[in-house]
Image: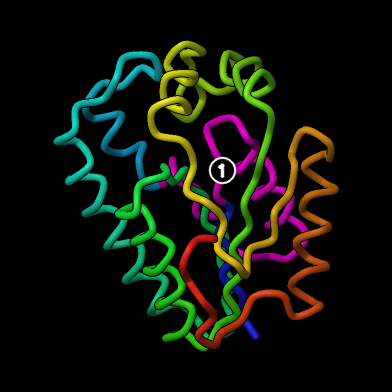
């Protein structure tokens, strides 16, 4: 059975790095949020430090919808890994529900994975030079403000929660693979509401 894994966590929590490890272990296609965001961010001239205007997200949504359409038409055995930061705003749960619905339509197992990390470690990581490669947030003060004002959407009841401060990306990916093979996540309707 194919799997759609959704890695959710704040900026610098290791979503893409864990996604790369997981893709190498499973052969699943990694569709990290910057694969969707960066065509628009690049065209706009984003630098990872200056706040983005709200209107840019309508254009990002168009890329996301085209990506979802392609995933729906993927080979029946294809598995996918998505990454995202979801703020603690009820409207952000739409992305979780959308991927859950895509998995159901594809008759795929859906595994939400919430990544946690202490704020001070996130602040340290967000300033690392490698983050410039994908137009990621690189402003420590901006990250602090984001976490203070927006937070992170609480994990749904069926999520695997991993602390990326206490485990390496490889260990996290192994835990996810273990959870997938043990049947955590489901293609059936689980309670999608956050705890």
Decide which of 115, 172 is in the foreground and name it. 115
Tell me where residue 14 appears, x and y as whole percent. Answer: 65, 37
Is residue 32 on the magenta stretch? Answer: yes
What's drawn in magenta, residue-wise? Answer: 8-35
Q: Is residue 2 left or right of residue 65?
A: right
* Residue at 19% from the left image edge and 45% from the top image edge: 59
Q: Residue furthest front?
A: 195
The answer to whether 77 is drawn above or below residue 13 in the figure is: below
Residue 128 at x, y percent in the picture = 62, 15
Q: Is residue 42 left or right of residue 166?
A: left
In magenta segment, residue 54: no
Mark 1: few/some/many CA within 10 Å (<14, 14-19, 20+): many
Residue plotted at (57% across, 60% down): 81
- Decide if residue 35 is on the left or right side of residue 168: left
Q: Residue at x 66, y 18 (%)?
A: 120
Q: Position of residue 13 (x, y in %)?
A: 63, 35
Q: Quadrant of the N terminus?
A: bottom right
Q: How is the image coloured?
A: rainbow
Residue 12 vs 171, above or below: the answer is above
**As rendered, which of 64 and 55 lies closer to the eye?**
55
Say which quarter of the image contains residue 6: bottom right
Residue nearer the viewer, 68 or 145: 145
Q: Nearer the viewer, residue 5 or 188?
A: 188
Residue drawn at x 69%, y 21% is: 121
Disc 1 target residue: 9
Q: State the image quarter where residue 35 is shown.
A: top left
Quadrant where the C terminus sits is bottom right
The image quadrant that residue 72 belongs to is bottom left
Q: Is residue 105 left or right of residue 118?
A: left
Please tell me how many numbered marks the rendered image carries. 1
Q: Is residue 27 above or below residue 12?
A: below
């Amino acid at each position: 059975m194919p799997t759609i894994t959704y890695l959710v966590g704040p900026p610098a929590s290791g979503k893409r790095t864990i996604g790369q490890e997981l893709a190498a272990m499973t052969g699943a296609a990694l569709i990290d949020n910057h694969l969707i965001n960066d065509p628009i961010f690049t065209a706009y001239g984003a630098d990872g430090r200056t706040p983005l205007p709200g209107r840019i997200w309508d254009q990002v949504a168009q890329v996301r919808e085209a990506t979802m359409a392609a995933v729906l038409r993927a080979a029946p055995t294809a598995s996918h890994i998505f990454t995202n930061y979801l703020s603690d705003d009820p409207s952000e749960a739409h992305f979780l529900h959308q991927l859950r619905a895509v998995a159901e339509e594809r008759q795929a197992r859906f595994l939400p994975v919430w990544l946690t990390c202490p704020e001070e470690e996130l602040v340290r990581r967000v300033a690392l030079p490698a983050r410039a490669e994908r137009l990621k947030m690189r402003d420590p003060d901006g990250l602090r403000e984001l976490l203070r004002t927006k937070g992170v959407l609480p994990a749904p009841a069926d999520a695997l929660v991993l602390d990326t401060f206490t485990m390496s990306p490889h260990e996290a990916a192994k835990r996810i693979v273990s959870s997938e093979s043990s049947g955590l996540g489901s293609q059936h309707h689980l309670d999608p509401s956050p705890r």
